[in-house]
Image: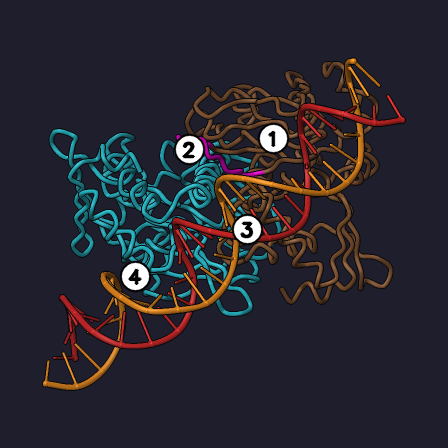
Chain colours: A cyan, B brown, C orange, D red
DNA sequence: CGGGTGCTTGATACCGATCAACCCACGTGG
DNA sequence: CCACGTGGGTTGATCGGTATCAAGCACCCG
């Protein structure tokens, strides 16, 4: 339920749109390290936006850093901001009254969240917590609401980002209901790995801890572990965060 | 994953906003029966929209009727329209290559779908099928894309509706992962029934077949049946589509 | 070297899918 | 009027998948 790592896309956006002008707009965004500037200007949410729209948007934007396990907001709180992830990962989860909790979405670099509260109720529906050290950009919902009336580019960006999240969520529902644990893991690997040389084998590095992946896939950590060991028989080699697939074709047959 | 029945809200909207003017705009919408006119003008998607925006929006709108089991579109097809449900229910589902299929969302009167394809890829991600005789309004995606640049009201309506769907979907994920079958059914009943007199007991009528509810809750029909019979011990009486809860408080304790 | 933390492995229990049979309401045609 | 078929729903028996609990393992860092 989240986009691939954006290290590459970030720089690409910078080149493509001559967004070095955009970098100048980042004055108000304090404490940005050089590599973060390119990460912010390359955010899919901001990509392809007109200069006036960008300027208005960034005028009140605010950078926040969270430590691992720090909670950004909790269910029931008033929703006041919309967020874009610059680096790191956050998990959205819900806890029932017995204390059991389940992840509902995982956000990584380039992902946005919180825009569903623009016109739909004022209270958060989930908790959101940093899974690791994280940098995010926060936009005031009030400000965005105003801009939607002035800058169609902003409206389009919000719609695009909401749509992405909705498609991810529905995909997640379908996968939860149709696939077993090993199938879900295989599917995740195949959609996130880069194919090697001849396109037969493939390799990837998990961008976060396995327990996070487990939550994202709706599994207990133990179940993920067992799924990996099942996939071992299908030519999947896991060492730490490194995953190697010997034959991608074999994996695609569940 | 869908809104409550809109018979009431439809008429309410008509009164509240003096949308009888809107009814005049419905000329181009052929073959609308009187009661459907009020259902269309009362669609949440159109509610609170300025007259110019409404006029442009409805200019190319088109009413469609589907028979039970008729397929509106299938996974992989080019997405060209955005839809609002006037009456009846549709199910969005995905089928894997073994032929097993799972519902991902259920759309009823007042719900919208298809707007996630506005700026995110051109191919449908799911099949959508009428569960019963259905009336829907179709808007051209191209036309909506243009209007988003001209009429902020349209952009807002799209954002609102996408947000609703996203919140429903995330809710669905959380419930799937946290609740057992009887809990899901109890939750559904409690969020869809109207409380009786003293607020202790409650009654409702299912707006569709039980097998549809099963799909919406991610259950096999047999599992739904068993869940109902479990709830019988908690004072839930089911006869056909009629459901009566003797003590809502008891149900809330799972 | 001791003590976290993240991950794996094993044993068990439970929930829900699946397959199969049956029931019931309804409609149709002989 | 009854025989029959059909579709939606229920009930029972079984099986498989995953959560859960518990223990053990590997690694990192002080």
Residue lying at 51% horizontally and 35% vertically, measured from the top left: A155
If the image is split into quadrants, where does the N terminus of chain A sit? top left
Alpha carbon distance from label 2 to label 1: 36 Å
Residue receiving disc 2: B96
Q: Magenta part of the protein: which range?
A: B95-105
Number of the label disc, if any, that sits on residue B171: 3
Residue receiving disc 4: A133
User: Dot 3: few (<14), some (14–19), or many (≥20) neighbours within 10 Å?
Assistant: some
Q: Chain of mark 4?
A: A
Is residue A20 something that shows in the picture?
no
Q: Secondary structure at mark 3?
A: helix
Residue B182 sits above or below residue A68 on the image: above
Alpha carbon distance from label 2 to label 3: 24 Å
Q: Nearer the viewer, mark 2 or mark 3?
A: 2
Q: Earlier in the sequence, mark 2 or mark 3?
A: 2
Q: Secondary structure at mark 1?
A: helix
Q: Secondary structure at mark 2?
A: loop
Q: Quadrant of residue B23?
A: top right
Q: Are marks 1 and 3 on the same chain?
A: yes
Number of the label disc, if any, that sits on residue B154: 1
Q: Secondary structure at mark 4?
A: loop
Q: Earlier in the sequence, mark 2 or mark 1?
A: 2
User: Dot 1: few (<14), some (14–19), or many (≥20) neighbours within 10 Å?
Assistant: many
Relative placement, left or right, of B179 versus B48 is left
Relative placement, left or right, of A66 versus B131 is left
Alpha carbon distance from label 4 to label 2: 38 Å
């Amino acid at each position: 339920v989240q986009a691939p790592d954006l290290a590459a896309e970030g720089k690409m956006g910078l080149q493509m749109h001559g967004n070095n002008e955009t970098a100048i707009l980042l004055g108000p965004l304090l404490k940005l390290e050089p590599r973060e500037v390119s990460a912010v200007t390359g955010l899919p949410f901001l990509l392809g936006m007109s200069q006036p729209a960008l300027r208005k948007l960034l005028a009140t934007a605010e950078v926040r850093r969270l430590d691992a396990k720090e909670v950004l907001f909790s269910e029931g709180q008033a929703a006041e901001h919309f967020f874009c992830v610059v680096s790191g990962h956050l998990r959205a989860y819900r806890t029932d009254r017995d204390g059991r909790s389940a992840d509902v979405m995982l956000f990584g670099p380039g992902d946005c969240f919180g825009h569903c509260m623009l016109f739909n109720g004022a209270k958060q529906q989930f908790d959101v917590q940093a899974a690791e050290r994280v940098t995010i950009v926060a936009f005031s919902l009030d400000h965005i609401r105003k801009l939607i009336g002035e800058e169609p580019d902003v409206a389009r960006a919000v719609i695009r980002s909401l749509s992405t999240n909705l498609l991810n969520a529905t995909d997640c529902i379908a996968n939860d209901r149709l696939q077993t644990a090993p199938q879900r893991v295989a599917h995740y690997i195949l959609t996130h790995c880069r194919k090697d040389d001849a396109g037969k084998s493939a390799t990837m590095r998990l961008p976060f801890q396995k327990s996070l992946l487990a939550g994202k896939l709706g599994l207990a950590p133990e179940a993920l572990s067992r799924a990996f060991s099942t996939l071992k028989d299908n030519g999947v080699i896991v060492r730490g965060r490194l995953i190697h697939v010997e034959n991608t074709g074999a994996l695609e047959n569940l």
